[in-house]
Amino acid sequence: MKTLKKIMNAVFILSIIISCSKNDENTGGGNCSEECVYTITANETAGTAASSLDGVHNLTMHHADAASPYPDGTKAKFTIANNVLTVEIDGKCITIKNPILTVAGSTEVKFKDSCRDKISYDVSENKGSLNEVNISDLNGKWLGQFNDR
């Protein structure tokens, strides 16, 4: 009986250790260690990414400008969740909050990484689906486009 009790205690303790262990798998959507909370200026309007865009989007760079930090063919993972964008490119990851509206009446919102890479990720929606993610510098110079075409 004492042996059975010891075994049961060991199984119980082992199950607690296993269930409480850290999950290192990166599932996107805010699991980046780097976060950029953009400060919206007085002449900008807060934007909202359509909830229909929430999810993971694996896209490829096309039409890269000579000044683009990403050449044609660069693969990227964009995760949109609750009006927050997580960008994973070349092993680097950043979560960006506080998007702005590109133009009044537009279906595109800008997630500005003013913290690390100084790039705006302009998320474009078309008929409820992700159309593309254009990138530009923070002054508005177009640098290229991530899409699945």
Image (cartoon, grey):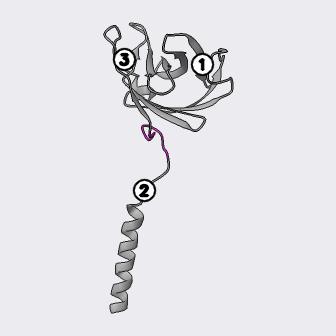
Q: Foreground residue, 27 or 87?
A: 87
Distance between mark 2 and mark 3 Cα atoms: 35 Å
Give the residue at x 42% y 56%.
22
Q: Secondary structure at mark 2?
A: loop
Which of the labelled discs sits on residue 145, or is there none? Answer: 1
Q: Residues within 10 Å of mark 3 (few under 14, many from 20)?
A: many
- Marks 2 and 3 in Cβ contact (< 8 Å): no
Q: Residues within 10 Å of mark 2 (few under 14, many from 20)?
A: few
Q: Secondary structure at mark 1?
A: strand
- Marks 1 and 2 in Cβ contact (< 8 Å): no
Q: Residue 103: where, in percent of width, then height?
A: 42, 7
Q: Specify the amino acid type for callout 2.
A: Lys
Q: Secondary structure at mark 3?
A: loop
Q: Residue 21: where, in percent of width, then height?
A: 41, 60
State the residue position of label 2: 22
Mark 3 or mark 1: which comes first in sequence? 3
Q: Specify the amino acid type for callout 1.
A: Gln
Q: Main secondary structure of the magenta part?
A: loop
Which of the labelled discs sits on residue 37, or is there none? Answer: none
Q: Residue 65: where, in percent of width, then height?
A: 65, 14
Q: Residues within 10 Å of mark 1 (few under 14, many from 20)?
A: many
Distance between mark 1 and mark 2 Cα atoms: 36 Å
Above or below — where is 67 with respect to 74? above
**Which range of residues does the magenta coloring cover?**
26-33
Q: Foreground residue, 41 or 82?
A: 41
Within the image, what quadrant is residue 148 found in?
Answer: top right
Q: Residue 41: where, in percent of width, then height?
A: 33, 13
Q: Specify the amino acid type for callout 3.
A: Gly
State the residue position of label 3: 47
